[in-house]
Image: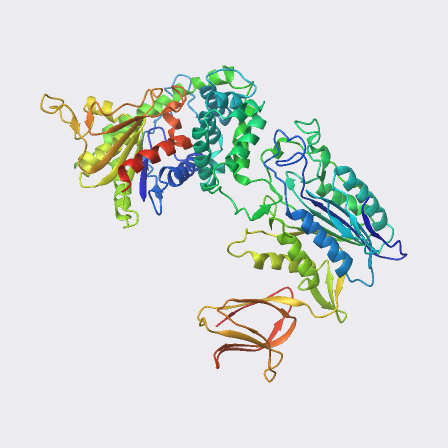
């Protein structure tokens, strides 16, 4: 088992389950017998790196004094085993994300998350997904024993039913991050999906009906999620960036990331990243929320993505950010517009200059999450 | 490069027709005109709206039933044609072992029209090129069913010839799901699974074939309407030739120094309409290439049915009809299985006759040319021969 952290501390805490699947035994390029129809699905380089990056962020980056990180379950399948530093600083080998390991890790995660009403449960999965009526997320041994198995979906699980199953968990805050494609493959539509099991069986009575449980999908329904090969995916990069910056909001004198604010921060990061040369992706938020749960608190004002453009700006123009009109510039964006950069949240005077000539003057601009976008006259 | 496609008889506007126009246009643009056009633009002048309209809705057809085939019936006929009527649990693999190019053509023909796009056409061109250079690859002996065949074909084609760029996102990106283009190929192949009692020789096919009789009513009707109404009382072109002439004029006006050629493709009756337009109504309109496919231009001329037909040809001094001087090159494609297609070289001079086998039966051959990537590859070769500098 790969329980990277389990403080067993009393009181509320954050309990996380991180699943990353890049190696698939029975898909194209896998080590086992190739499925007759692997749906064209191949091995992936990004999910192990993405899952590891998110797990390491939880270990080193998560700050929540109400519900500090209390446990972390990690299962990752990669061509070569992945290691992670445990709570004692020792690097331990992470178990592969086979269906059995995913189930076992889920049971441990659920039990801990269910131990206190004010817990925060975090679920993260990165890997291949296929959607018909529900979203199927595939384990490393999907398609075992190879060939044309009697139960094709035995080693995949139903995310949507798992989400509904988590309604019986007491944890008031529940965050679900799904970094997977949601394509509706014609082949998949041939199956009725009833044998696609949930990790946590839904229960109709005794539900936690006031949970704050957002779902962030890396892709819209019937669409794809992307990553540079062997790099952290677009979604996971945006998620980590948003957690540390524009997913926050000023509340009670602190910059807090909550179920109400995180989604718009991630969506904006993905949206701004849809530029030429990058496969376009649409992040979608879903889920149910009865109130607000904070997942993370920033130590300082967040850095906010800023895009300033202008139709008539000369190529030699630069953009200055000043805390006040009389202060020296905090930051200068050079080069031709549009200017894209991250700027710490606050109020600024924005001056567009061509040499010494002032060509646009915005004296009091609020640069606040999730983004600041402005077209200069 | 402007390309004008003139359809044949028995074509009526519908969602299905518009989808098939789009599928065909993608294959023309991405395969047939590859290397010949900077900006291929395909136009489809639609003249079915001015063709035959049976006053009693075809009540005179004995069983009153001339609706077109249902999808399953069409698929059944396709498989019957492709596999030669041999029952097999794995018709694709069976066909591939006989001829991989034919299996690829069948796969692309099976892709639903509304799921076809430029990427599908591009992949079709690459796959048929792979199949033609590997007509009997050794891996066909290593797979044992249709699903394995499709999986292996995808792997082999994707890995083949790194100089050819595969459609889709650049290799530096990976997506957490299926490759959409191949998914559409599998979707088309999946239609085979829904066939009633498998394809070959089934009662369903016999029933589907019987429905062809009904379609003959519109088929004959469209020809008669065209011949009867092609010229108005004052001698100007009637509705149908006017539609085609307008499209040719627009195509001529759209040429640029980068795309200097105009090509017109006439399928079946569309070839006859083009010939009339170019020889009688607008002999001033110039085409760089005329392509007639599954057409009856030769037999119409033998029967002297064209406006420009001359009764003194053939004679000892004029054994053949001269190809219209406003046509740079004339390519005529026929399939011996297509009883409605005819050669041209015995009647016209010069015309380049090319035989192309759709691999279909007499029932399917006439309508199958333009759905096959291999047809568009052949056409690209012929057009390149005559148009490329």
Q: Residue lying farthest left? A: B317
Query: In what quadrant of the picture does the N terminus of chain A appear?
Result: top right
Between residue A369 and residue B173, name the one nearer to us: B173
Q: List x then y, in percent, for residue B56.
A: 36, 25
Between residue B18 and residue A119, name the one nearer to us: A119
Instruction: Decide if residue A104 is on the left or right side of residue B147.
Output: right
Q: List x then y, in percent, for residue A198.
A: 75, 39
Q: Would you place residue A221 above or below residue A335 in this image?
A: above
Q: Residue at x 22, y 32 (%)?
A: B276
Instruction: Decide if residue A218 is on the left or right side of residue A155.
Output: left
Q: Residue at x 28, y 23 (%)?
A: B342
Q: Would you place residue A32 above or below residue A6 in this image?
A: above
Instruction: Decide if residue A329 is on the left or right side of residue B237.
Output: right
Q: How many marks?
A: 0
Q: List x then y, in percent, for residue A165.
A: 78, 43
Residue B230 visible to an observer of this rendering:
no
Please name the colour scheme applied to the rendered image: rainbow
Residue B228 visible to an observer of this rendering:
yes
Q: Residue at x 22, y 37 (%)?
A: B328
Q: Would you place residue B155 above or below residue B40 in this image?
A: above
Q: List x then y, in percent, for residue B230.
A: 23, 32
Q: Residue lying farthest right? A: A10
Where residue B105 sits, quadrant-wise, is top left
Q: Would you place residue B197 above or below residue A90 in this image?
A: above
Between residue A355 and residue A23, name the one nearer to us: A23
């Amino acid at each position: 088992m790969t329980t990277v952290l389990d403080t067993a501390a009393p009181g509320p805490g954050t309990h996380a389950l991180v699943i990353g699947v890049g190696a698939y035994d029975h898909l194209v390029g896998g080590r086992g017998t190739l499925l007759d129809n692997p749906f064209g699905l191949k091995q992936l380089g990004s999910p192990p790196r993405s899952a590891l990056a998110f797990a390491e962020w939880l270990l080193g980056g998560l700050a929540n004094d109400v519900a500090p990180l209390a446990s972390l379950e990690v299962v990752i399948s990669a061509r070569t085993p992945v290691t992670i530093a445990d709570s004692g600083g020792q690097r331990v080998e992470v178990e592969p994300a086979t269906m059995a390991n995913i189930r076992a890790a889920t049971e441990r995660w659920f039990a801990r998350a269910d131990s206190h009403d004010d817990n925060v449960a975090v679920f993260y999965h990165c890997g291949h997904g296929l959607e018909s009526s529900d979203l199927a997320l595939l384990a490393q041994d999907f398609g075992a024993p190879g060939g044309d198995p009697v139960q094709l979906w035995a080693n995949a699980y139903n995310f949507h039913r798992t989400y509904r199953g988590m309604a019986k968990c007491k944890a008031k805050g529940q965050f679900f991050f799904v970094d997977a494609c949601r394509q509706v493959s014609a082949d998949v539509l041939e199956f009725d999906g009833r044998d696609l099991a949930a990790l946590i069986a839904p229960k109709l009575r005794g539900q936690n009906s006031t949970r704050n449980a957002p779902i962030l999908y890396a892709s819209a329904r019937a669409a794809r999620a992307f990553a540079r090969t062997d790099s952290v995916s677009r979604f996971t990069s945006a998620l980590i960036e948003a957690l540390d910056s524009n997913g926050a909001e000023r509340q009670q004198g602190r910059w807090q990331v909550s179920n109400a604010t995180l989604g718009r921060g991630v969506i904006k990061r993905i949206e701004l990243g849809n530029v030429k040369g990058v496969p376009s992706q649409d992040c979608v938020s879903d889920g149910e929320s009865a109130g607000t749960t904070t997942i993370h608190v920033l130590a300082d004002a967040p850095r906010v993505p800023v895009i300033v453009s202008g139709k008539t700006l000369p190529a030699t123009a630069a953009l200055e950010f000043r805390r006040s009109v009389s202060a020296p510039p905090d930051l200068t964006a050079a080069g031709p517009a549009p200017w894209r950069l991250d700027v710490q949240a606050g109020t600024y005077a924005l001056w567009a200059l061509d040499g010494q000539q002032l060509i646009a003057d915005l004296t009091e601009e609020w640069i606040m999450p999730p983004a600041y976008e402005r077209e200069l006259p | 490069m402007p390309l004008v496609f003139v359809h044949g008889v028995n074509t009526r506007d519908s969602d299905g027709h518009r989808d098939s126009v789009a599928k065909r246009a993608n294959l023309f643009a991405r395969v047939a005109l590859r290397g010949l056009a900077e900006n291929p633009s395909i136009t489809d002048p639609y003249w079915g709206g001015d063709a035959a309209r049976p006053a009693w809705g075809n009540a005179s057809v004995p069983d009153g039933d001339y609706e077109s085939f249902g999808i399953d019936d069409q698929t059944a006929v396709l498989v019957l044609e492709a596999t030669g009527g041999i029952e097999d649990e794995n018709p694709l693999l069976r066909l591939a072992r006989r001829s991989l190019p034919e299996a690829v053509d069948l796969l692309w023909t099976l892709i639903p029209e509304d799921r076809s796009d430029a990427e599908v056409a591009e992949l079709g061109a690459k796959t048929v090129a792979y199949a033609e250079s590997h007509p009997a690859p050794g891996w066909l002996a290593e797979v044992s069913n249709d699903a394995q065949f499709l999986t292996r074909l995808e792997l082999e084609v994707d890995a083949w010839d790194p100089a050819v760029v595969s459609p889709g996102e650049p290799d530096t990106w990976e997506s957490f799901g299926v490759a959409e283009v191949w998914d559409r190929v599998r979707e088309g192949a999946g239609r085979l699974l829904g066939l009633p009692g498998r394809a070959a020789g089934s009662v369903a096919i016999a029933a589907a074939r019987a429905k062809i009789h009904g379609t003959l009513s519109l088929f004959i009707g469209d020809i008669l309407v065209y011949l009867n109404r092609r010229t108005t009382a004052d001698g100007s072109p009637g509705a149908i030739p006017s539609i085609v002439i307008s499209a040719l004029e627009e195509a001529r006006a759209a040429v640029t120094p980068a795309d200097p050629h105009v090509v017109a493709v006439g399928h079946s009756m569309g070839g006859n309409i083009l010939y009339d337009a170019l020889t009688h109504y607008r002999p001033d309109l110039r085409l760089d290439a005329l392509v007639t496919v599954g057409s009856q231009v030769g037999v119409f001329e033998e029967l002297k049915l064209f406006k420009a037909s001359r009764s003194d040809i053939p004679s000892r001094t004029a054994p053949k009809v001269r190809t219209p001087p406003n046509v740079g090159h004339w390519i005529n494609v026929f399939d011996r299985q297509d009883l409605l297609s005819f050669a041209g070289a015995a009647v016209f001079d010069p015309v380049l006759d090319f035989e192309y086998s759709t691999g279909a039966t007499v029932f399917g051959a006439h309508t199958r040319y333009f759905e096959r990537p291999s047809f568009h590859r052949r056409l690209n070769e012929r057009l390149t021969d005559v148009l490329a500098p």
